[in-house]
Amino acid sequence: MIDFVWLTLIKATPVIYAALGGVLSERSGVINIGLEGMIAIGAFTGVCVSYATGNAQAGAAAGVLAGALLGALLGIAATRFRVEQIVAGTGINLIALGGAAYGLVVVFGQPGASKQVAALGTGGETAMVVAALVLAVLLHLFLFRTRGGLHVRACGENPRAAEVAGIDPLRVRLWATATGGAFAALGGVFLAMAELDLYSDGMSAGRGFIALAAVIFGRWNPLGATGAALFFGAFSALQYTLQRSGIPSELMQALPYVAALVALAGFAGRARAPAADGIPYVPVR
């Protein structure tokens, strides 16, 4: 049971980071479909910098920065240019995943997977698992117990009223989306440099979309999204626990995704997103 709980935490951690990034972005009013790409770019950049420097910590920091830049790109597209947010997020996924696949050949001279690099090790893995849970609590306190969090939620609910109150909705949305990108990239760093010590093509494996499901299932609440991510993580852990049961491996691998679909299907119509989520805002002045 202890092994199962720990495996659940490990499998849930990258989803938790990405889901927290999605919560922050959507609470400000920007739908972040690009979480999958932000996980991938965090993982790939972290591995590349670790390979070049031999320093895992430098790689982790670079991965987070890459995610923040990708989040900022989405934020600029959504706020300054008012691009349709789902289209922009999908484009970011394609650019990040395709760019990482091409980068494997450019940087490592081989497709499919990178060479092994300096990683964060067991201690780093444990620290990142604990940090994900702590970050969920801190983000919850920020959103619901601080003035800054109130500003973020106001921009996601009624940006016009927020502007009248002296808040710049476009700046808040840009900041929230960039920070959310950094959170999602932490999930990629965990996958490539804590759970493993390399980047493999497609290693994000739909975790960004499961994170989006966790955001909805958790009612756009950091603690709720974390609980949903743990729920999905338990199904990921279950496939390893039951791998000797005789159940086809393909069905076992599909368990987390089936769980996400079933959860969303049963939850549809009962969750209310922030009122201005996904709606471009045109400032009064």
Image (spheres, helix red, strand yellow):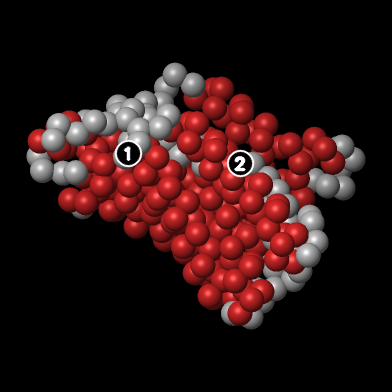
Q: Which mark is residue 268?
A: none
Which residue, as the protein is rendered here, is positioned at the far right? 246
Q: Tell me, yes or no, if residue 13 can be seen here.
A: no
The residue that disc 2 covers is 94
Q: Residue at x 10, y 43 (%)?
A: 166
Q: Relative to 31, say whether 114 is above or below.
A: below
Label 2 amino acid? Leu
Q: Residue at x 47, y 51 (%)?
A: 70
Q: Please, what secondary structure does the residue beneath circle 2 have? A: helix
Mark 2: few/some/many CA within 10 Å (<14, 14-19, 20+) = some
61 with respect to 50 (left or right)? left
Residue 19: percent from left, percent from top: 48, 45
31 with respect to 229 (left or right)? left
Q: How many numbered circles does the render carry?
A: 2
Q: Please, what secondary structure does the residue beneath circle 1 have? A: helix
Q: Relative to 212, say whether 125 is above or below.
A: below
The residue that disc 1 covers is 79
Residue 190: percent from left, percent from top: 59, 62
- 9 or 180: nearer the viewer: 180
Which quadrant would the N terminus be assigned to in this image?
bottom right
C-alpha gap between disc 1 and disc 2: 21 Å
Which quadrant would the C terminus be assigned to in this image?
top left
Q: Tell me, yes or no, if residue 238 can be seen here.
A: yes
The first of marks 1 and 2 along the sequence is: 1
- 200 or 154: nearer the viewer: 200
Mark 1: few/some/many CA within 10 Å (<14, 14-19, 20+) = many
Tags 1 and 2 touching, CB below 8 Å: no
Label 1 amino acid? Thr
Residue 207: percent from left, percent from top: 61, 45
Q: Residue at x 41, y 26 (%)?
A: 271
Residue 54: percent from left, percent from top: 64, 80
- 86 or 108: nearer the viewer: 108
